[in-house]
Structure formats: C-alpha cells, structure tokens
Amino acid sequence: MVNRNLVGAHYGLGSWMIQRMSAVIMALYTLVVIVVFLVAPPSTHSAWKALFAQGWMRAATLLFLASLLLHAWVGMRDVYMDYVKPIGLRLTFEVATILLLVVYAAWAAQILWRV
C-alpha cells in the first residue's frame, strides 16, 4: 500500500492553476465583449443573434462558460473541503454541485447552438 502525503508544496497546484487560468480566460472574454459593445453595440434581438451566429463568438463564449464552470467547481470544492467536515455530507454537496454544473453546461450549449 502506498501512503500519499496530502500536504506539501505541490498539493493543490493543479487546482490553483485551473483557478488562475480560468480567471485569465474569463477576463480576456470580458475585454472582447467590452470592445464589441464599444465598436458596434447590439441593440436589437437580430443584432444579438447575428453576433452569436459567428463561429468565433460561439467558440469564445463556450470557452468562457467552460472556464466559468471549472472555476466554480474548484472554488466550491475548496469551500466544501474547508467547511463541511462530515464526509457523506461533503460528498453529497460535491455530487450535487457537479450535477448542477453539468446541467448549466448543457443548457448553455443548447442556447449557443440554437441561435
């Protein structure tokens, strides 16, 4: 049996990187949206539809949503690990969060590709 040491310099590095990289992606997407609004603000439904009908905008939005969901997962998992001590309750919260995030992802993809 191998004993894993759960403390140390590298434990959690992957989660930290996911949080930072997803935050960078979300910030870049926000800047792109601000530029789009400054250049040609969509004021009608058809203008919004035309904006999101473009492949690059759908891809960028999907990347933003994936980053948001990963960011939310890591954050919530850390909160559960820090504050929910009974393992059964923590596992229940984690599974519920995963299911909810999967539903959000499917819903967002449906919205993006329905436009």
Image (tube, rainbow, N blue to C red):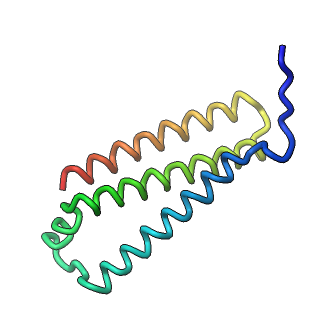
Q: Give the quadrant of residue 22.
A: bottom right
Query: Which residue occupies 25% across, 82% down?
Result: 41
How many discs mark residues in the rendered view? 0
In the image, residue 89 sits, relative to residue 1, either above or below, namely: below
Query: Which residue occupies 56% across, 62% down?
Result: 23
- Give left or right: position of 66 versus 71: left
In the image, residue 74 sits, relative to residue 32, either above or below, namely: above
List x then y, in percent, for residue 37. 31, 81
The quadrant of the image that shows the C terminus is bottom left
In the image, residue 20 sits, relative to residue 70, either above or below, namely: below
- Give left or right: position of 88 versus 1: left
Query: Which residue occupies 33% across, 46% down?
Result: 107
List x then y, in percent, for residue 33. 36, 74
The quadrant of the image that shows the N terminus is top right
In the image, residue 47 sits, relative to residue 54, either above or below, namely: below
Q: Give the quadrant of residue 42.
A: bottom left
List x then y, in percent, for residue 96. 54, 36
Residue extending furthest top? 1
- Give left or right: position of 56 versus 78: left
Query: Which residue occupies 19% across, 51% down?
Result: 114
